[in-house]
Every structure is written in C-alpha cells, then in structure tokens.
Image (cartoon, rainbow, N blue to C red):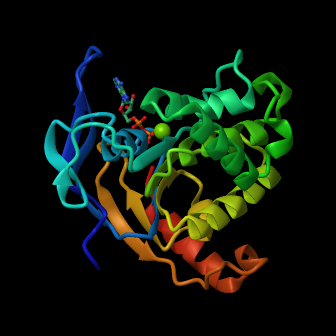
Amino acid sequence: MPQPILQARSISKQFDSGATPVLAVEHIDLDVAPGEFLCIAGPSGCGKSTLLQMLGGLTPPDSGQVLLNGAPLTEPSPEISVVFQKPNLMPWRTVTDNILLPLQIAGVPAAEARRRAEQTLALVGLSDFAGAYPQELSGGMEQRIAVARALIQQPRILLLDEPFAALDALTRERLNDELLHLWRRRKLTAVMVTHNIREAVFLADRVLVLSPRPGTISAEFPIDLPRPRPPGVQYSQKFGALAYQIRQAITE
Ligand SMILES: Nc1ncnc2c1ncn2[C@@H]1O[C@H](COP(=O)(O)OP(=O)(O)O)[C@@H](O)[C@H]1O
Ligand SMILES: [Mg+2]
C-alpha cells in the first residue's frame, strides 16, 4: 500500500456516562489508502459510529492515535467531511443556504461560496431545488443535500455513517450508484460504515468486519469486482459469493 492517507493505530474508546462503562471500540488498527473505498460492516451497536467519529477527529480516542497523512489528527480537518444517517438540515434555510453553511463558517467570500454551491448542487443533480426548503424534499433528496454539504468543502476524504439506511431500497441503490460516480470523479477516499452487507460489497474495494462490542476488526475481504461496477453486478454469482462470505464472518 502507498503511504496511507488515514490510519488508526490501536484506538480504543470507552463511554463512562451510564451506570456501567461501555467499551465501544477496542484496539482497532487500520490503514486507508489514498483513493480507496473502504467499507466497515458489523452488527448494530458494535461501535461503528464511534470508530467513524474517531477517524473524523470528532471524538478523541482514549488510547491510540488517528493519523491523517502520517500526522496525528486531534480535531476535525477540512480534508475530511462526514455524512451522517440523519441529514440534519436546517428547516429555516433553503437548500443553497444549508450547503453554504460550512463555507460561511470557514469564512469563504460570498461570491466564491455561491459559485461552489451552484457547482455542488449540479453535481448531486439538485440545481432545480436550490431555493427549496428541506420540508419540500424527499428523504433521498435530503440525503443528497447532506452529501453536497459534505462535498462543498472539497475534502479529500469522505466518511459516511450509514448515510442511506433510512431510505427505501430503490432510492438507496440509486444513491449508492451516484456516490460511486462522485467518488470517482472527485478522486475521493471514502470510508463508509454500514450494517448492509450487499451495500458494502457493491461500493467497496475492501470490507472490514467488526466483531460485536467492543468493536475489533475480525475479518477483511478484498472486493475484486470490476470498476466501474457494471449494471446488474449485484446479481452476479461472484457478488453473491462475496456477500455470503462476509455474512458468515459477521457474528451478532
Ligand atoms: N455518546 C455516547 N455515550 C454513551 N455511550 C455511547 C455513546 N455513543 C455510543 N455509545 C455506546 O457505544 C456502543 C457502540 O455504539 P455505536 O458506535 O453507536 O455503534 P454502531 O454505530 O455500530 O451501532 C453502544 O453500546 C452505544 O450505546
Ligand atoms: Mg451507528
């Protein structure tokens, strides 16, 4: 592997807020290559979201380190954007004003910010909805806006936490397809956590399987399906075999 863009070195995280401490993630080591699409699969509650938040510099590990381009990551970086399961759009802001938010916070001049908002909306196919409010959008459109809000910062790394889990199967399939296009076009590095095995196989170059809590990496599967993924690849024998192997590796 070339110099990894993102690394976890034996990171662990425990939550002490409840009656009994919860060890969410234990000694995870992983390397993400530049341009890779990595999926992390595992049962509900195994620590996937906690892991992703540590990889994004949003939550500090209790022990171990996250490295971005070889340097310790101790706070959110403009090189990394995160897309969550809930779109978290502000209902009183238009679509454009929602995706402009990160640029406004970063102090990007208004004209430049507007130009980038237009470009990014076109990228996710929602130029016609620039002036709409979130409540006028479908769930799939809202998630596209959430993706746009992440991309407008022009990150090199996109972290995704089950971004399409709440959507119906067809919309989800379509958004996964679009996500792969964006990943290729923007030469992004992507790390996505999901409990959906077929989604992981469809998207990833490599799938890591997490054990039940505390999450540790229990298996790794390279996905050597062709790129771009051909139409109908989900229904091929090879795809089915990979999904089945991964399913066998996941314990609940
Ligand atoms: N902020 C928090 N405070 C206390 N416990 C938490 C917090 N976040 C997650 N947990 C606990 O850590 C464990 C892993 O959670 P999470 O990372 O959300 O799992 P997953 O995303 O795989 O479903 C769960 O038992 C959850 O209840
Ligand atoms: Mg989660």
Q: Quadrant of residue 47?
A: top left
Q: Tell me: 135 left or right of 68.
A: right
Res 164 visible? no
Q: Tell me: 63 left or right of 90.
A: left
Q: Is residue 207 above or below residue 138?
A: below
Res 92 visible? yes
Horizontal and vertical percent position of residue 192: 49, 54
Q: Quadrant of residue 68?
A: bottom left
Q: For the image shown, how many numbered marks are present on the structure?
A: 0
Q: Tell me: 18 left or right of 160.
A: left
| Quadrant (top left, top right, bottom left, bottom right) of the N terminus | bottom left
Q: Is residue 22 above or below residue 205?
A: above
> Residue at position x 82%, y 35% from top?
138
Horizontal and vertical percent position of residue 98: 64, 29
Horizontal and vertical percent position of residue 29: 23, 59
Horizontal and vertical percent position of residue 227: 61, 82
> Residue at position x 43%, y 56% from top?
157
Residue extending furthest toward the left: 63
> Residue at position x 73%, y 36% from top?
142
Q: Quadrant of residue 185?
A: bottom right
Choose between 98 and 160: the one closer to the eye.
Answer: 98
